[in-house]
Amino acid sequence: MAKFKKHILVCGGSTCHSLQSHIAISNLKAILVEKNLEQEIQIIETACFGFCSSGPVILILPDNTYYKCTSPADARMIVEEHFISGKKAYDLMLAESQIDGLASNPKLLASPKKQIRIALRNCGNIDPENINDYILNGGYLALGKVLKERDPQQTIDIIKKSGLRGRGGGGFPTGLKWEITSKSQADQKYVVCNADEGDPGAFMDRSILEGDPHSVIEAMAICGYSIGASKGLVYIRAEYPLAITRLKIAIAQAREYGLLGDNILDKGFDFDIELRYGAGAFVCGEETALIHSMEGMRGEPTFKPPFPSVSGYLGKPTNVNNVETFASIPVIINKGAEWFASIGTEKSKGTKVFALAGKINNVGLIEVPMGITLREIIFEIGGGIQNGKKFKAVQTGGPSGGCLTEAHLDTPIDYDNLIAAGSMMGSGGMIVMDEDDCMVSVAKFYLDFTVEESCGKCTPCRIGNKRLYEILETITQGKGTMQDIDKLKNLSYVIKDASLCGLGQTSPNPVLSTLENFWEEYIEHVTVKKCRSSQCKAMMQYIIDAEQCVGCTACARNCPVNAITGERKLAHLINQDICIKCGACVEKCKFNAINVK
């Protein structure tokens, strides 16, 4: 790499792949050849930079300049202006506010950007399919340190002292889990990486595996050494083809370099990794359900104890951590437990990766220190609400979390504060909503997901959540009563108390949090039969303003159910008994004569 004067890093994550980043790479290569610059400028396909709404994104180093490259004309402009004319292609540069919020290059991460990259440290900065890139950035140094300088218990003590808690949602102390597994006696132990993130809007683990698979491999080997395991398993959903491909490449490279397999680094330590595929079942994020799925059985949870640390995969002691948890391990070993523990809050150390989605300007991937506020994330890093709309709520923790309001914007984000606010950390999905969202419908959306994803093993979850959904459906159809609201609350607490696993125990959270924070919307739905956000179709009415209607007949001609009548050049009328609220009339009316009430 030293022979190249400059490098063009092209995002090769799933989002930019879907936006044809491979075509951007081909265009850039062709123009570099045309301009005789291919010996001076190297193109490297990396992974997610964090700018998920602006792809395909490229970063030019050492100039630290981000561009959007969506067409052959863009590629030509970037090469001709940036490299030949010596000036920046300003029309294609990402907005400064977006770079401040989401820049993923560590060299650009000054304190105003609010981010500290630990789990995401290499994502977007290295070629994920080149082990040498990872090694040049300190890769496998941590594994070498523990094998040469630490015994297993000393390594576990470092992780315990760091305060790292599981990033999959439960927040159980990682070092303690390792220690329990290490003390379990068996002829075989297992290290399992949970790469089955299933929250709507979540893509943290996928991005890490696509952008830095070796960090997870290295961490799993360190865990194996610490607990006395020689086998590792990555449980990954088959819906992640790019992550699977890069993980396979990384495992093969690690074996070739002697970093997986027998007698690693000549220290008598044997460890290897295999992949196991999931079918995308949300419940398999729960560790016992995940283990059963790997064993070829139905992905159903079982009552604990015994915990997997004592009896897990094939009845053997098994340590389960998720991708983000593992990705932080090499940094903790290299920089020290004290360094990691200095970041975050008293009970929640380090950083957390979040996937920002929804009605927010800077959709993307961020990593922030624990203790940062929702306000800082949404309005500084995220760039505020789209189209100048008013912020209404943010759902943290996915279907297991809750909807937080403007009153919670200054809440420091950590495990305990989010639970106290009626939500939870979860794996890191963060969906932002604006004034146009109906919170009753939002609760129904998450219940619909939970009902679909329930394994059906226990009655409170299987039947209870279905009943919750039916009550919400009744309310959003304008048929609800105050008694229905009472049923929602009472049934939610029964499900939380009686369900077997975390899916059922947390599934009512969206209902309870919206009841707590948006009570008036529920009241409007059941008393005046009104949805203030005009999202519940059964409560909507399309009304033609007689003074604005010119009788052009466009609405009547495009109504799929012939609900609109009227003579040409005279005001028309919508039959509310026939109207299906499809919105076709509003779309076709050029005179803004149709109002939604």
Image (spheres, rainbow, N blue to C red):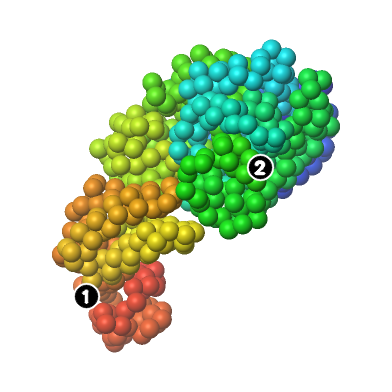
Return the residue nearer the eye: 298 or 385: 298
Which quadrant holds residue 121?
A: top right
The quadrant the C terminus occupies is bottom left
Q: Regarding mark 1 in the picture, which secondary structure is present there?
A: loop
Q: Residue at x 58, y 58 (%)?
A: 298
Q: Are marks 2 and 1 in contact (CB under 8 Å)?
A: no
Q: Amino acid at mark 1?
A: Ala
Within 10 Å of the Cα at label 2, are there few (<14), some (14-19), or many (20+) other Cα atoms? Answer: many
Q: Is residue 384 above or below residue 239?
A: above
Q: Is residue 390 above or below residue 44?
A: below
x and y percent of residue 81 in the render?
A: 67, 32
x and y percent of residue 476 in the render?
A: 29, 65
Q: Residue at x 34, y 42 (%)?
A: 423
Identify residue for label 1: 546
Return the residue nearer the eye: 470 or 5: 470
Looking at marks 2 and 1 on the same chain, the residue that comes earlier in the sequence is marked by 2
Identify residue for label 2: 234
